């Protein structure tokens, strides 16, 4: 027999709004926490993700190729066996699927994606982890790496750490808070972090920007920033010297409008 335990006072008069949202008690509301990590930021602006350059955006929704850099990530292997992919279709509606891996050989997704918002190892063998880096992309696949990488799961992370998210159709996202941190061995050079939005007009707009030297910057927006549907939110970094490690985090509250699609599987 199961029980429902309300986390409110004995008088049943109060429960914090964020907790209510996290528990799914407020229809049309949900939170998304997006983490990013880039171990090697140099003197060119890059997304805070464990790859090179800025996260690319396809011009149209595409079927993606999913592959690993390690042959053990396969349907009966010791590494990752299946991967959950969550993203947006050509109309920015939420879609998802589970893909069965075949090592370094690419497996094509059933869905066509305009954006990938999240991916994670769904099942694994005795290693309890991906054995290699798992890529989602297009083009020629060489040793498990596609020519164009749209998203990836780094070895042993088992889910994406990409500082990028696209607001689904029918939702308004409210930027509640963010964080950026950076460090380097010398401790004598600075890193610029930027949180930006890109709407359907293609213009890059800055929501927050900071420069730090072996430290952390936290943002709490007392009046949350409203971000329209179909807008990309992205954390980027650029160093005044090479070899910086950077992390990012931002929290969005998604509120559905009258045309919102059904919410996808929560990942945070």
Image: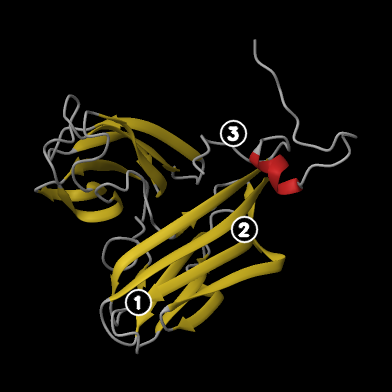
Q: How dense is the environment of label 2, judged by Cα within 10 Å: few (below 14), some, or many (20 and up)?
A: some
Viewer-side residue, 39 vs 137: 39
Viewer-side residue, 43 vs 93: 43
Residue ID for mark 1? 45
Q: CA distance from mark 2 to mark 3?
A: 17 Å
Q: How dense is the environment of label 1, judged by Cα within 10 Å: few (below 14), some, or many (20 and up)?
A: some
SS class, disc 1: loop
Residue ID for mark 2? 228
Viewport quadrant of the N terminus: top right
Q: Which is closer to the viewer, label 3 or label 1?
A: 1
Q: CA distance from mark 3 to mark 1?
A: 35 Å
Vertical placement of residue 91 versus 150, above or below: above
Mark 2 and 1 residues: CB-CB less than 8 Å, in contact? no
Viewer-side residue, 168 vs 130: 130
Q: Is 159 displayed left or right of 129 in the figure?
A: right
SS class, disc 3: loop
Quarter of image, res 96: top left
Tell which residue pokes out farthest to the front in this image: 10
Residue 188: image x %, image y %? 34, 89
Residue ID for mark 3? 262
């Amino acid at each position: 027999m199961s029980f429902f335990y309300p986390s409110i006072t004995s008088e049943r008069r109060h429960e914090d709004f964020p907790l209510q949202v996290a528990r799914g008690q407020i229809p049309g509301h949900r939170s998304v926490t997006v983490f990013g990590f880039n171990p090697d930021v140099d003197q060119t602006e890059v997304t805070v993700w464990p790859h090179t350059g800025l996260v690319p955006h396809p011009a149209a929704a595409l079927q993606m190729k999913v592959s690993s850099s390690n042959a053990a990530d396969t349907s009966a292997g010791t590494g990752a066996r299946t991967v959950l992919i969550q993203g947006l279709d050509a109309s920015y509606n939420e879609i998802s699927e589970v893909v069965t891996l075949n090592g370094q050989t690419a497996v094509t997704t059933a869905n066509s994606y305009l954006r990938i918002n999240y991916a994670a190892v769904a099942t694994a063998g005795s290693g309890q982890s991906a054995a290699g880096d798992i890529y989602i992309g297009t083009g020629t696949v060489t040793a498990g790496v596609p020519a164009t990488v749209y998203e990836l799961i780094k070895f042993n992370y088992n889910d994406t750490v990409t500082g990028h998210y696209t607001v689904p159709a029918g939702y308004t996202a409210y930027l509640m808070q963010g964080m950026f941190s950076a460090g380097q061995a010398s401790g004598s050079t600075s890193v610029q972090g930027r949180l930006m939005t890109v709407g359907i007009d293609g213009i890059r707009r800055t929501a927050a920007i900071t420069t730090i030297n072996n430290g952390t910057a936290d943002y709490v927006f007392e009046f949350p920033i409203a971000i329209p549907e179909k807008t990309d939110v992205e954390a980027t970094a650029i160093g005044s010297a090479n070899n910086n490690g950077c992390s990012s985090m931002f929290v969005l509250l998604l509120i559905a409008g009258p045309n919102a699609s059904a919410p996808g599987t929560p990942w945070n």
